[in-house]
Amino acid sequence: MNEKIDEIKKYVKELKIPGISKNLNMKIEDAYRLDQSYEDFLREIFVDAYDMRKENGKKNRIRNAKFPYKKYLDELHVEYLPEDAKKKLKELKTLNFIKESRNIILAGNPGTGKTHLSIGLGIDACNKGYKVYFTTVSLLINELKESRSEKKLYTFEKKFEKYDLIVADELGYISFDREGSELLFQFLSLRAERKSTIITTNLSFDRWNEIFNDEVLTAALIDRLTHKSYVINMNGNSYRIKETKEWLEKTT
């Protein structure tokens, strides 16, 4: 019997089907003891393998998304969010914006929950089977510049076409030179109405020219990004300060 089980495990390993080898001996013993039908035994084996593959898929998508840390939607203190975010949160959590290839722009002063909300939506999307990638705008521009200098820009842009959702964090923390502005414009324009992008920014639209330094390009980019998008006003009291205060109250 053991030789046969070892042979089965060898085939399972070769076929790369996770979730079958684990507890296989015990499952076979239970099948004999319960006089389980072949159909029920096979079903149980493959259900376990299917569940493990789904779980591994979620973990892999979250890991590959490169989130700086994990923040979940159910950890959000909704009462701390700005009013506009509270009103639209229920709709955002459906993830319909990804199906409809719509963007989300979270604009407001620092500390109001923009990054937490964007990561939470990103992780939820990973768990629902979507491919997600997280980056800061400054890092994205550096990668675009490097790709152009190495004559790999087309390959870089094609690589990002596979992502259903890209989170571009911290637009507005640093200004760009003309090359960076043009590359970012091209990159985001290629995704417009084809795939979804979440952008977090601490600047209102009338101040975007401060970082792009080109009025025509800035106007064109805003027009592309906001078309059929969720533009959420994240101005409000600091989410972080409220969280910290609540934590301090619990620990004292």
Image (spheres, rainbow, N blue to C red):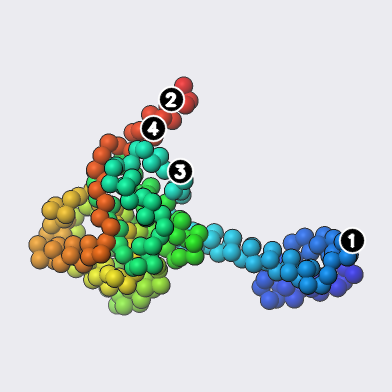
Q: Compared to 226, does 157 lie above or below?
A: below
Residue 75's label in the rendered image is 3
Mark 4 near mark 2, Cβ–Cβ under 8 Å?
A: no
Toward the viewer: 184 or 223? 223
Toward the viewer: 150 or 129? 129
N-terminal-most mark, 3 or 1: 1
Cα distance in 3D space between marks 4 and 1: 56 Å
What kind of element bears circle 4?
helix
The image quadrant that residue 186 belongs to is: bottom left
Percent x, y for residue 89? 36, 50
- Residue 78 relative to residue 23: left or right: left
Asked whether residue 173 appears in the rendered view, the answer is no
What kind of element bears circle 3?
helix
Percent x, y for residue 196? 34, 65
N-terminal-most mark, 4 or 2: 4
The image quadrant that residue 50 belongs to is: bottom right
Percent x, y for residue 18? 67, 67
Q: Residues within 10 Å of mark 3 (few under 14, many from 20)?
A: few
N-terminal-most mark, 4 or 1: 1
Q: Which residue bears the numbered disc 2?
A: 249
Q: Which three-letter amino acid code belongs to the residue tagged 2?
A: Glu
**Picture residue at 83% right of the left edge, 70% below the top:** 37
Residue 244's label in the rendered image is 4
Q: Which three-letter amino acid code belongs to the residue tagged 3?
A: Glu
